[in-house]
Image (cartoon, rainbow, N blue to C red):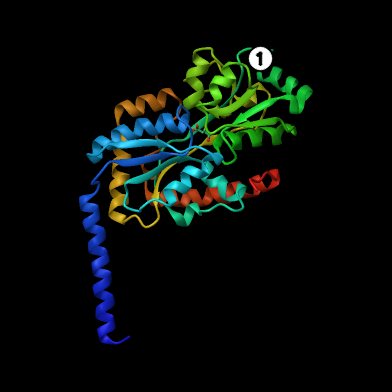
Amino acid sequence: MTTTRRLLVAALLGAAAFAGQAAAQAFPTQQITMVIPFAPGGPTDVVGRLLAEVMGRDLGQPVVVQNVGGAGGTIGVHRVVQARPDGHTILYTNIGIATQPTLYRRLPYNPLTDLEPFGLVTPTPMIISVRPNFPGTTLADFLAYARERRDGVNLANAGLGSASQLCGTLLQAQLGINFTTVSFTGSGPIFPQLIAGNLDVYCDQTTSSLPFVREGRIRGLAMATRERLPQAPDIPTTAEAGLPGFEVSIWHGMYAPRGTPRPVIERLNRALRVAIQDPTVVARLNDLASPPEPLERVTPEAHRAFLEAEINRWRPVLQAAGQYAD
Ligand code: MLT
């Protein structure tokens, strides 16, 4: 390279770095849109709104939730992938982002290269619940019913590529039964149908199911956890209730589009760390059995490494189940 070209490249790199820093110093200059790739009222929405409020206070601009449901969350994720990478559009979503690359063989994005993860948020246990008028009160009752009715059992999920779909897939694989699955755009629209008795069973996160179980509007049969939860001590674990080894925990994270300047990512990460340490947020998350992640996991680096490990972890499991979107 000639000296003139070298000077030109150095000048261009310097200008790009300066532009990134200037953008970060000014950031945010307008309201931030937090895309939730599921319908209102579900676990992602409930926790996303909690975080959005505190992050907005910390950032000095409102963080406004936009629900973009459909196709198991992939439509909302794609919306963020395509957004301007300036930090004013972010994504809050769950483990589904790690199952979608296997389930969708023509997925229009790669979570690892098209997004900038900026922090893990909360691990959430799953609970198996049935409609309130289900003829039985225990998981053993449900298992007997399921073995007799097989595809006559209606299992809800929030679409192929959602957390509930993953849990339902694992449940069916463990039982060796294919239920009739009914897909929605999120957990929010599922609950009225489950409460009304139009669906039989749902495996969902405690953050949305637990309040309905506590109110007696749905029947929580088993927690897919190793130990009973102090937040719901009367609900047995899956192992206690007849499904040994069936443990499912869901994780969540926040993302910006690829190309968002590093200083902006760091600012968003700081706001997220403030939010997950906020006493009101901590109390609410703990009450819903979904505590904040330890701070060492709330970094872009830890999140990216975990995302990659999770994509690799679920690929063979889902390939064995053989369910694809195309
Ligand atoms: C899921 O199954 O991924 C979630 O329950 C969807 C939602 O947050 O509504």
Q: At 49% across and 12% down in the image, what residue appears?
A: 215
| SS under mark 1 | loop
The residue positioned 69% from the left and 20% from the top of the image is: 142
Rendered position, 58 above or below 241:
below
Horizontally, residue 6 falls left or right of residue 122, namely left
- The residue drawn where x is 55% and y is 36% is 163
Q: Position of residue 208 (x, y in %)?
A: 48, 25
> In the image, is 130 to the left or to the right of 4?
right
Give the crowd class for mark 1: few <14, some 14-19, many >=20 residues within 10 Å.
some
Q: Nearer the viewer, residue 258 or 284?
A: 258
66 relative to 106, above or below? above
In the rendered image, which residue does mark 1 sit on? 134
Residue 182: x %, y % from top left: 64, 30
Q: In which quadrant is the N terminus drawn?
A: bottom left
Figure check: 291 above or below 309: above
Horizontal placement of 233 versus 119: left or right? Answer: right
Q: Quadrant of residue 10?
A: bottom left
Q: Is residue 149 visible?
A: yes
Q: Does 221 sit above or below residue 165?
A: above
Q: Which residue is pictured at 74% across the width and 20% down the height?
A: 145
Q: Is residue 219 visible?
A: no
Q: Position of residue 281 (x, y in %)?
A: 34, 28
Q: Quadrant of residue 284?
A: top left
Q: Residue furthest right?
A: 148
* Circle 1: residue type: Phe
